[in-house]
Amino acid sequence: SRHIGPSQRLQRASSSQSRAAMAECMGCVTGPCGTRRAPPRAPKQQRVELNVGGKRFTSSRHTLSQCPTSLLAALVSGCPQEDGSYFIDRDPDFFGFVLSFLRDGAEHFVPPDDARNCAGLRREAKQLGIEQLAILLDRKLAEQAEKGEPQAPIASLCPYRPEPPAYVGAPIPNNETQRIATLNGLGVLYTSREHHYDCIVDVIAALLDMPIVLVSLVSADEQWFKARCGLDCSTTSRSSSFCAFTFKPE
């Protein structure tokens, strides 16, 4: 029989340990924040039932996870309701467009024809955290405005939506298109709350003895609060925003 010395036994043990460690780390991924355990993969075509504002939709977990940072991806990563569906308190009239965008991608997506439905869909995209869709619609609306195209009547998909009130807020600045593009490029709108922003508003409220302190971002049709102290709502209409008056002069 072949004699195995102590050094060879040590090398074999070390090699065996290395293979075991490599096998254990096969489920790990390396990113900008270091190496971490990869999450378990859900079946790509697992069927998902959605209840959107009382209307039922059926999609797949793969489709709903196309935008990993969206509220939809976060929702379907959790547990459904007792009836097996996921409830989303949003406008069902626009949700079909959202699913089409997630299924077909930006290159093949066909947005609504008229500006008013585009604006409504853009708001839903922002609320759901689908930033790529919101940016696509911002570009379409900006192109329509530059061409001087009139607003079309409300489409049949939302026949009962009331006429929105006339805008009576701060004047729209001349650089509005560039401002909205810059704001969208920051990637901050409709993101989750962050501890350091919450600390800023809490400290300022305490130092200045102010009942309400906000970190406000003004989009095309509303203002959204990245951090807030003394106010329960996370958004208000742009027409009620006095922060929008700071845009003039540009």
Image: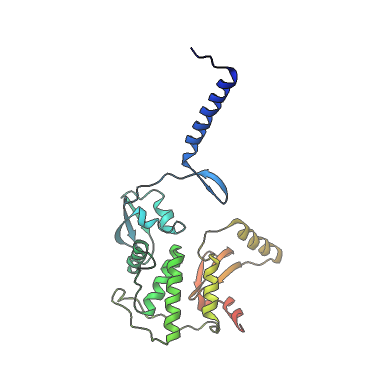
Determine which quarter of the picture holds residue 122. bottom left
Question: 98 or 194, which is in the foreground?
Answer: 98
Q: Please provide percent x and percent y for residue 180.
A: 52, 75
Q: Residue at x 64, y 60 (%)?
A: 202
Q: How is the image coloured?
A: rainbow
Q: Residue at x 33, y 57 (%)?
A: 50
86 vs 215: above or below: above
Q: Residue at x 50, y 38 (%)?
A: 25
Question: 171 or 83, which is in the foreground?
Answer: 171
What is the count of numbered marks?
0
Determine which quarter of the picture holds residue 183. bottom right
10 vs 134: above or below: above
Q: Residue at x 48, y 76 (%)?
A: 221
| Residue at far top of view | 1
Image side of residue 193 versus residue 60, left or right: right
Q: Please provide percent x and percent y for residue 20.
A: 49, 31
Instruction: Quarter of the image for the C terminus: give it.
Output: bottom right
Q: Please provide percent x and percent y for residue 64.
A: 37, 57
Image side of residue 27 versus residue 46, left or right: right
